[in-house]
Amino acid sequence: MPTKRGTTAIDMRIYKAVVNAVMSHRLPPGTHLGEADFCELYNVSRTIVRKALQRLAHDHIIELRPNRGAVIASPTPQEAREIFAARRALEREIVPLVIQNATPESLKQIRAAIAAEDAARRSGDRAGWIRLGGEFHLLLAELAGNHVLRRFMAELVSRCSLIIALYETPGSAMCENDEHEDLATLIEKGKVKEATHLIEHHLLEIEARLRLAEQDKKVNLAEALSGF
């Protein structure tokens, strides 16, 4: 029998795998998540799978629907606008804190995150590029030094990834590396006002590229979770 600690590790692994697949747009909104598929993929009981699914539902990544089970959440256009508004408000608070708490090490972490994004883009790894773009924003929240903001950002970034997967314009680059580069430069220079303005503009630009047309995508769960 797995220990309590081992069980927690497994359900967290499932949780993180789903979140990473959502952030990489490998699991688009509306995708059904069968408990039996998870049991087979991870060789675990339904009890462990349900624990992970409950955590995902709590963070609004999935919806638990009667008679249908778990599906990746499908935010409405109104919910999308509200989520982006909340994220802009949060990141307006985060950026000044990043500058206030900046150290040589934190600035190095920001540059390393941008380099990883660029490497994924250059290699043609779109899924990795998208995920790393979201992780860049999560890194800023972490460097802000406020654990509550970091927790809220983790939920909002995942929910924004769902929104982008649902409403993005085909072929568009949702999170340009140049904007992240410019933001890093402003952070390094301690330009609070300019950096705060840029992060808001950056998020408004992402939202402006969205179109309100639901995508009907068929997904293989094993393929979507591969590598996580």
Image (cartoon, rainbow, N blue to C red):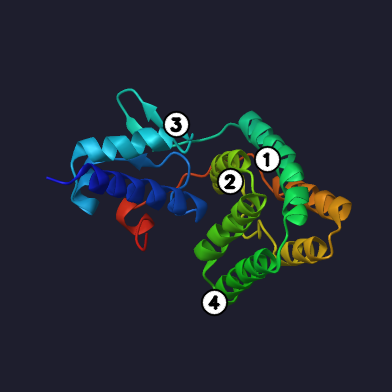
From the image, tell me which residue sits under label 1: 87
Q: Which of marks 1 and 4 is nearer the N terminus?
A: 1
Give the mark nearer the N terminus: 1 vs 3: 3
- What secondary structure is found at the residue carrying circle 1? helix
Quadrant containing the N terminus is top left
What percent of the width, then of the height, locates residue 175? 67, 58
> Secondary structure beneath disc 4?
helix
The mark lying in front, picked from 3 and 4, is 3
Q: Read off the residue under disc 4.
A: 123
Tell us which disc is closer to us: 1 or 4.
1
Check disc 4: other Cα within 10 Å, few if <14, some if 14-19, many if 20+.
few
Q: As drawn, is 191 to the left or to the right of 124?
A: right
Does residue 218 appear in this view? no
Q: As drawn, which residue projects farthest toward the top?
A: 66
Q: Which residue is drawn at 47% across and 49% down?
A: 22
For marks 2 and 4, give the one nearer the viewer: 2
> Toward which corner of the image does residue 66 lie, by quadrant?
top left
Distance of label 3 from label 4 (alpha carbons): 35 Å
Pointers 2 and 1 in contact (C-beta within 8 Å): yes
Residue 112 vs residue 176, the one in the foreground? 112
| N-terminal-most mark, 3 or 2 | 3
